[in-house]
Amino acid sequence: MRLLQALFFPPEQPGGVSSMIPYMQERFSSPRWEMELFSLPKRIRNKGSEEVVFDTFDWTLYQDSPVVTKYIQTYRDYLWWVKLRLHKTYDLIHAHHPIAGLAMKEAYPEVSLIQTIHSSYERELILNGRIKEGGLEHQFLTSLYKELEAKADCLLTVSESFKDYLRPYIQHPEKIDIIPNGFDEKRFKPVPHENEVPQLVTVCRLVPAKGIDTLLRACYELKKKGHDYVLHIIGDGPIRSELEKLAQELGIYNETIFYGYTLHPEEFMPFFDIFVLPSRAEAFGSVFAEAALSSLALVGTDIGGIAEQIEDGVNGLLVPENNPVALADALEKVILDPAYRYELARTASEKAKSEYSLSRSVNLLKKLYLQYEVCS
């Protein structure tokens, strides 16, 4: 079977897709499977010029929005790059971004398309204050879900909670299948260690949706109670300077280390003790599975895919979003009780190995792919 994995970002970019798809290739290296990866390089901008027409809605109703016009131009660029670079035929295309899926179906209308929706761009934009709920951009971006439903032969997503999120925007939500992201255990090598001062770590893009402001305020509460800790923030983004300023204002800057962007944070994670990320939205939350495989205790918000990965008090701790005091209380529990912290980490690691292994995800995908080989 000739299979094309259509990404949007290049495989080396951070995120849930990049944590799985590039590592799948070796699992498909057999005479039965021939798998390629395709993505849009960052240098390709403003190349495409084709007229864009969708089957289920008129996108020009929203063209007064710069966000929408940029999205449409990116779609044109992706389609231009597809037609320039791809000249093979494929038995099946699996797309991992709406732009990738729509462009591939335009270029290969006769090839079956599996579309995974990994996250919600509109939710991130709303939480990051870039668009308004119910505005032109929100209407356009949610309309794309019905277009994807019309174009794809199969819709996938990564969690039950995100399937529920998609429900109002498509006609047949019951047909959506769920395959969580999978992680190659060989990438994660837990290291036995004892840190005299508990080491907290978070890994994310520094945007409002990730709730790092809540984390900093929780750390202020910890310091106020006299607890020693170090907070490591791995990642970069548009609000980094605001967060650094907040850490200074709260008097916790000396306990906080801002690393900036790091390509392979899993290489550092095993040396920390507690992974914490108080996100305001997560379709899945790949970094929690990665932290679990690194044998860290998990603390996260009771939302989306995080709440599906963590059973509160069993393999991690869950707290309400936007609640620094509750987050500080949860962190205090795992800071003060190393044995409890170890037990949470051990259970989280076992669950991640059984439910979020790359082998499991690959096996589920192979079964799905073979259905389309039979049908073709």
Image: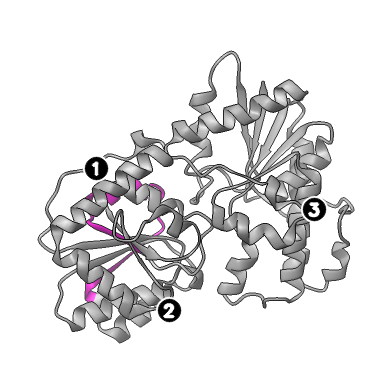
Stretch of the chain drawn in magenta:
254-276
Q: Name which of mark 1 and mark 2 comes first in the sequence.
A: 1
Of residue 103 and residue 179, the one placed in the foreground of this image is 179
Q: Residue at x 61, y 58 (%)?
A: 164
The label on residue 190 is 1
Circle 3 residues within 10 Å: few <14, some 14–19, many ≥20: some
* Residue annotated with mark 2: 242
Describe the element under mark 3 as helix, strand or loop: helix
* Residue annotated with mark 3: 147
Q: In which quadrant will I find the C terminus?
A: top right
Q: Are marks 1 and 3 in contact (CB under 8 Å)?
A: no
Q: Residue at x 85, y 63 (%)?
A: 59
Residue 267 seen in render: no
Q: Residue at x 74, y 32 (%)?
A: 86
Of residue 308 and residue 23, the one placed in the foreground of this image is 308
Residue 375 vs 357, above or below: the answer is: above
Is residue 145 one of those drawn in magenta?
A: no
Q: Are marks 2 and 3 in contact (CB under 8 Å)?
A: no
The label on residue 292 is none
Q: Quadrant of residue 199?
A: bottom left
